[in-house]
Amino acid sequence: QVQLVESGGGLVRAGGSLRLSCAVSGGFVGISTVGWYRQTPGLQRELVASITTAGITNYSDSVKSRCTISRDNAKNTVSLQINNLKSDDTAIYYCNARHWTGNTYWGQGTQVTVSS
């Protein structure tokens, strides 16, 4: 069973930066992709960024120039650095892991609030 625990959310002023971290229990064995998603009330959960086992990254257009996703295999974590935060970045951010068996796992989410 894969468990994901997010951390690093909080209240940040517009223009500031934040680093979110996702701890993957048991490590990355069997995990093909880890991604960060976000959701605001009334809207669908959307992909922010993802990274594969091979280190291939993918970013949404809305954050591409401001975000960096990375993984630390020694610490079993995937981090998301977001710079130049905007009010539109306010959301609950979720970590997601896809297993090669097809199972998908979600963390409990961490709130990011950007004040103008």
Image (cartoon, grey):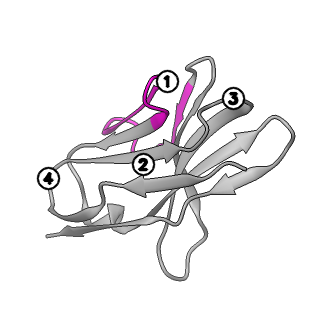
Is-magenta flag for residue 52?
Answer: no
Q: Is residue 56 left or right of residue 64?
A: right
Q: Secondary structure at mark 2?
A: loop
Label 4 sits on residue? 15
Q: Position of residue 28 (x, y in %)?
A: 62, 31
Whole-Å distance between the Cαs marked 3 and 4? 37 Å
* Left or right: residue 41 compared with residue 63: right
Instruction: Choose the circle earlier in sequence order: 4 or 1.
Output: 4
Indicate the amino acid at tag 4.
Answer: Gly
Disc 4 to disc 1, C-alpha distance: 30 Å
Q: Earlier in the sequence, mark 3 or mark 4?
A: 4
Label at residue 73: 1
The range drawn in magenta is 57-77
Q: CA distance from mark 2 to mark 3?
A: 31 Å
Measured as percent of width and height from the top left, residue 24 is found at 54, 43
Q: Which mark is residue 29?
A: 3
Q: Dots 1 and 2: beta carbons under 8 Å? A: no
Question: Is residue 85 left or right of 37 when viewed as pictured?
Answer: left
Residues packed near mark 2 inside 10 Å, few (<14), some (14 to 19) or many (20 plus): few
Judged from the image, the secondary structure of the residue bearing numbered disc 3 is loop
**In front of the other: label 1 or label 2?**
1
